[in-house]
Image (cartoon, coloured by chain):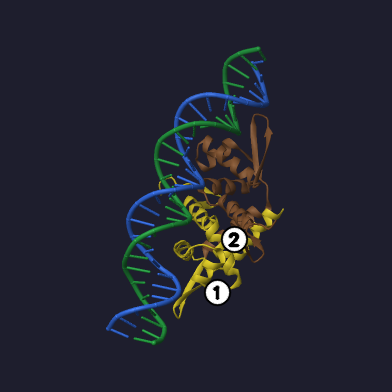
Chain colours: A brown, B yellow, C green, D blue
Amino acid sequence: MPKKDEYKLRGMTEDDLLGLADLFKMFADSTRIKILYDLFDGEKNVSEICEDIEMNQSAVSHQLKALKTAKLVRSRREGKSIVYALDDDHVKTIIAMGKEHIEE
Amino acid sequence: MPKKDEYKLRGMTEDDLLGLADLFKMFADSTRIKILYDLFDGEKNVSEICEDIEMNQSAVSHQLKALKTAKLVRSRREGKSIVYALDDDHVKTIIAMGKEHIEE
DNA sequence: TGAACATATGATAATATATTCATATGAACA
DNA sequence: TGTTCATATGAATATATTATCATATGTTCA
């Protein structure tokens, strides 16, 4: 059966574009972008992130979960802590492009 | 006088990071990303954009205004129409990086 | 094993954001 | 000049998103 008149934009389906928007949502919130930027330094556990970005633990945990679902960060246990790290090289590139746009 | 304890994250002030998040918000909505993606083809007027992305004129106009404020598109009059175009090379790069992330 | 610690989670309230509808603006041209 | 066409805008509603609070989960180590 034919897909119910889903249109395409230069080869991208509507779902593709919705997925793209969802990805960029991850960068579109100040708490999340602070977390991502903080992880540029390398792995950090949740408490360290909270201190660095001055946000409380619950808010950070909620946002870390969103970032993990989006496959932008990964985590592993290390003793009592959970350590997070960037999980995609594109994260740095995307943020770098954003900075360039702003700096012009 | 000292700035009231604004912290920095790897050389970025809080305001810098808020600005980055605001930029990425432009890519984080399906209507706006459809518009941007539609303009990959080149200049288009508002009616053409509406048809391509199947959204009504008012919604498109509101979002074009947001994109213009963010300096991601520019516009000029051409006869009765207003023609829009991408106004920043980074737009294509940023979206391309997003696509790569998703395709993996 | 159980107390202490680190993180995660669910529900709620506060806030932000997008779409719609009605209408305004402003250029073109008869 | 006034009508028509294309776009922009304001206000209101609908929807999504986030931070917070309270508490649950799971580890470590005495």
Residue B77, by quadrant, is bottom left
CA neighbours of label 1 inside 10 A, class few (<14), some (14 to 19), many (20+):
some
Q: Mark 1 lies on which chain?
A: B
Is C2 placed left or right of B79 in the picture? right
Secondary element under disc 2, as helix, strand or loop, is helix
Q: Position of residue B83 (x, y in %)?
A: 49, 74
- Residue A14 visible within the image: yes
Residue nearer the viewer, C19 or D10: C19
CA neighbours of label 2 inside 10 A, class few (<14), some (14 to 19), many (20+):
some
Residue nearer the viewer, A95 or A71: A71
Q: Where is residue B16 in the image (x, y as percent from the top left)?
A: 49, 54
Residue nearer the viewer, A34 or A28: A28
Q: Is D6 drawn above or below residue D11 in the view shown?
A: below
Amino acid, disc 2: Met
Q: Do the residues labelled 2 and 1 touch (CB within 8 Å)?
A: no
Q: Where is residue A49 in the image (x, y as percent from the top left)?
A: 57, 40
Residue nearer the viewer, B55 or D4: D4
**Which residue corresponds to mark 1?**
B43
**Residue at the farthest front position:** A1
Which image quarter holds the N terminus of chain A?
A: bottom right
**Residue at the farthest right position:** B104
